[in-house]
Image (cartoon, helix red, strand yellow):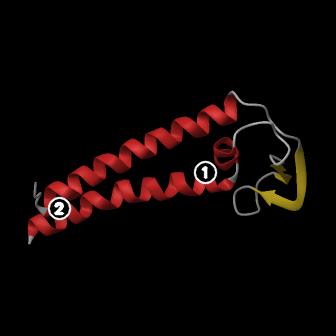
Amino acid sequence: MHLNRKTRIKYLTIIVWVCFFTVTGFIYYVNHYLPKGPLFSTGDIICMNDGRGPCAPEYIEEVRDLNIPGWAKFFKKSEGELLWMALLFLGIILPAFKNKKAAE
C-alpha cells in the first residue's frame, strides 16, 4: 500500500494529536491521583508580570523516593511537560506542511 505525501502527513498529524491528548491525560492523572512528594525550595524567586507582580520562592516536587511507576515519575517531572509541548508544536506545524505543498 503506497500513500501519497498529503495522506501520510494527514495520518501523522492524527497520530500526533492522539499522542498529545494521551500525554495530557497521563499528566493530569499523575498530578491529581497519584501520591505527591515533598516540596523543596530551589532558592529562586519567581516574579509574575516581568518582575512587577507578586514574587514568591519557587518549589519543586521531589519524586525520587515516591512509590510510583517510572512512567509516572517521567510525567511528574518537567520531561513530561517537554514532551507535551513538543507534541503540541508538531500538531500545529504538520498541517501547515500539508497545506504548503497543496498550494504549490
For the C terminus, which image quadrant?
bottom left
Q: Is residue 68 above or below residue 1?
A: above
Say which quarter of the image contains residue 91.
bottom left
Q: Which residue is mark 2?
A: 99
User: Can you name the residue that lies furthest to the bottom here?
Assistant: 104
Q: Quadrant of residue 29?
A: top right
The residue type indicated by label 2 comes to Asn
Estimate the x, y position of residue 53 in percent, counting from the top left: 76, 54
Q: Are marks 2 and 1 in contact (CB under 8 Å)?
A: no
Q: Residue at x 51, y 43 (%)?
A: 23
Classify 10 Å Cα crowding around label 1: few (below 14), some (14-19), many (20 and above).
some
Q: What is the three-letter code of the residue carrying label 1?
A: Gly
Residue 20 vertical position relative to residue 8 in the rendered view, above or below: above
Left/right placement of residue 56 relative to residue 84 reads right
Camera-side residue of 35 and 32:
35
On the image, which quarter does residue 45 sit in?
bottom right
The front one of 47 and 94 is: 94
Residue 83, percent across and down?
54, 55
Image location (x, y in percent) of residue 88: 44, 53
Please tell me whether residue 18 is drawn above or below residue 4 in the rendered image: above
Looking at the rendered structure, the number of numbered marks drawn on it comes to 2
Looking at the image, residue 32 sits to the left or right of residue 86; the answer is right
Residue with the most extreme front position: 1
Residue drawn 68% across the image and 36% down it: 31
* SS at badge 2: helix
The numbered disc on residue 80 is 1
Helix, strand or loop at disc 1?
A: helix
Q: Residues within 10 Å of mark 2 (few under 14, many from 20)?
A: few
